[in-house]
Amino acid sequence: MWVLPVKRRELVDLITPNRGGDVPGAVEENRPSFDIVRSDVMAAVWPAQPAEFGRLPTAIIVPEGARRDSLAWLATYVRDLRPFTAFCRVVERPIAERFLKGPSAPNLMGAEGVCSGLVLGEALTHARGRTSILDLPAATYSATLSHSISRTFALTAGSVAPHDVARYWMEARQLTGQDPLGVPADVILAVWSVALGSTGQPTHSRTLFEPSNILAAAWLELTTIGEIRDPVWHRLVEGYPALESMRDLLQMPREQRVHVIDTALRLLVTTRRETDERPSFLAGYFTSLLAPGTLDHADILAPVASLLPTAYLWYGLCAGNNLRGDALPVGNSLARRIVRDLTIPDRLVDRPRCDVALEELTMHGPGDKMVPLTTKSGRLDIDILPGVTMAVRWPTHDVSSEDQRRRARDKELQQLLIEMEDTTTKWRHLTERLRDLIDRREGDLRPNTRKKRGGK
């Protein structure tokens, strides 16, 4: 890494074209430190000697809290590079130091199954089970919160809290006008808090349920001994006596398992409580036992997806916990491709691969001028942290006003169809509950009637 302390005026001179390749004063740092960064001094960074690599730095390290002001200043005085963060990272010193201290090569530290499973499960969750994971476009996975959390984990070894990643991720979605999520970010974080608890990593987020609760206890046993033992199992299915026998589900033939799981899902849906996450966990766990280590039976959860919205997340997580294999969901290469993307080298000093960084997008807003600058038509790649790139839907390069109106109508129609389907599902389950209550009431009345007749 080559580093040069610069002030603003010197930085403009440095990145102005046609000024030669040499950069006097840049020095190679084997153990780089950003102590030189202070109120009026930034650090320009290159991965190799500037005379060979080029004068334009790959990163500019600015003091804490100075990123937006620095970007506004660059937008005023550097007009040839728009958006600037597509060519050069602008990173505040505390964030830069965290990424600099990360592993030499991005890795998931044995959590490949957890990360790929949650990415796949979240993609199914947002799709509401309406399609196979093999039919979803690749951008679907890089658009998930789980992908951003996993990528940050791979680059920093967990030094950046998941709730910070979620905050940047939500800001990018809101800024670019993405569709509302079927499952809120804090619910996804709650699942992650349980998943990370098993790897010994700090969770930093305790939303909805504490990591010490019954779900975390069940997950810990699944990841350490491969099964849920009796004491934890009894607590997990408390209030669902009909599910007690399902602890031996794997001992049943495959055809019988399908029937038993279908019955269990109906029971979990009809007796669920809004504040109880156990039904969703059990739904995902039971489904994962149909073909352990795979996601081949996601369609079984489709009828209950709207009522047990996190079931797909738990399903993906349990499928990733494949103690019989290599801790990756098997059956296709998709999980391995996700792990490959999560661990692609992208150092702080490497040239950005995104269309724009979040801070610059926030500053300028997603105006029409940004549309033709995107790398891929219909998609915008945003760096929410250095090397942590999320994809969002974006207008194509040749969008007319009529196309925009048609797209808006199609989007509204799709949303209405989703709401109608969810309402139909809820109506069906309410009908089943009502029929069950009527049957039980009639069953209670019959013995009384017989007793009266016998008395005569």
Image: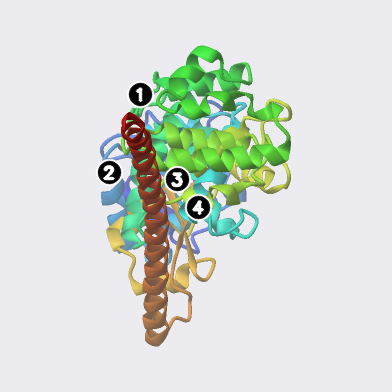
What residue is pinned by disc 1? 210
Q: Secondary structure at mark 1?
A: loop
**Contact, mark 2 vs mark 4 (Cβ under 8 Å):** no
Q: Disc number at residue 145?
A: 3
Q: Secondary structure at mark 4?
A: helix
Q: First in sequence, mark 4 or 1: give its number.
A: 1
Q: Residue type at mark 1? A: Glu
**Contact, mark 2 vs mark 1 (Cβ under 8 Å):** no
- Residue 323, placed above or below residue 38: above
**Would residue 11 appear left or right of 377 to someone viewing this image?**
left
Gap between marks 4 and 3 measured at Cα: 24 Å
What residue is pinned by disc 4? 303
Image quadrant occupied by the C terminus = top left
Q: Which quadrant holds residue 403?
A: bottom left
What residue is pinned by disc 2? 66
Does residue 339 appear in the picture of this structure?
Answer: no
Identify the colour scheme used: rainbow
Q: Secondary structure at mark 2?
A: loop
Q: First in sequence, mark 2 or 4: give its number.
A: 2
Q: First in sequence, mark 2 or 1: give its number.
A: 2
* Residue 323 percent coordinates (x, y): 68, 25
Gap between marks 3 and 1 measured at Cα: 20 Å
Q: First in sequence, mark 2 or 3: give its number.
A: 2
* Residue 420 percent coordinates (x, y): 38, 65
